[in-house]
């Protein structure tokens, strides 16, 4: 489990290849694939309407990127939200991007 800076519990499920937070019946989710050895591709972000505007997607992105860094994975950002997040925080994440 990843504990976000805003005290949000984020769960990583290796089997479903996702990071989730919120209620079990309607969680916010960051999904990924492992398309090649040493590469993680963040493919989709979803946040239920009642959780939007609270920084949930940002925290999911941070958790996923922290996992990628910890596991020494190169990052691809097929998900438009994660691509934008990485662009806004380029100095922090540029070194782990897959070229």
Image (tube, helix red, strand yellow):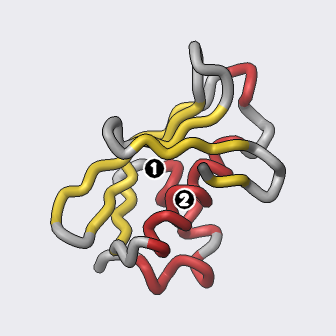
Location of residue 63 (image quadrant): bottom right
Kindly identify which residue carries mark 1: 80
Image coordinates of residue 2 in percent, x first then y, are: 63, 53
Secondary structure state at the residue bearing disc 2 = helix
Query: Which residue occupies 56% across, 42% down?
Result: 11
Kindly identify which residue carries mark 2: 84
The local crowd at label 2, few if under 14, some if 14 to 19, many if 20 or more residues have their Cα within 10 Å, is few
The local crowd at label 1, few if under 14, some if 14 to 19, many if 20 or more residues have their Cα within 10 Å, is few
Q: How many marks?
A: 2
Direction from residue 49 to residue 66 in the image, left or right: left
* Quarter of the image with the C terminus in it: bottom left
Image coordinates of residue 26 in percent, x first then y, are: 58, 17
Query: Which residue occupies 41% across, 48% down?
Result: 79
Image coordinates of residue 94 in percent, x first then y, are: 49, 82
Spatial separation of the CA atoms under disc 1 and disc 2: 6 Å
In the picture as drawn, the residue positioned furthest to the right comes out as: 6
Query: Which residue occupies 63% across, 35% down?
Result: 21
Query: Which residue occupies 18% across, 69% down?
Result: 37
Location of residue 15 (image quadrant): top left
Direction from residue 61 to residue 5 in the image, left or right: right
Secondary structure state at the residue bearing disc 1 = helix
Direction from residue 17 to residue 1 in the image, left or right: right
Tag 1–tag 2 contact (CB < 8 Å): yes
The label on residue 18 is none
Location of residue 66 (image quadrant): bottom right
Image coordinates of residue 8 in percent, x first then y, are: 75, 44
Give above or below for 90 relative to 15.
below
């Amino acid at each position: 489990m990843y504990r976000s800076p805003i005290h949000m519990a984020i769960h990583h499920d290796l089997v479903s290849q996702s990071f989730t937070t919120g209620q079990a019946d309607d969680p916010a989710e960051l999904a990924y694939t492992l398309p090649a050895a040493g590469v993680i591709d963040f493919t989709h972000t979803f946040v239920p309407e009642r959780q939007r505007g609270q920084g949930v997607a940002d925290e999911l992105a941070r958790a996923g990127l922290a996992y990628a860094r910890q596991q020494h994975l190169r990052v691809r950002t097929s998900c438009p939200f994660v691509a934008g997040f990485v662009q806004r925080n380029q100095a922090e994440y540029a070194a782990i991007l897959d070229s």
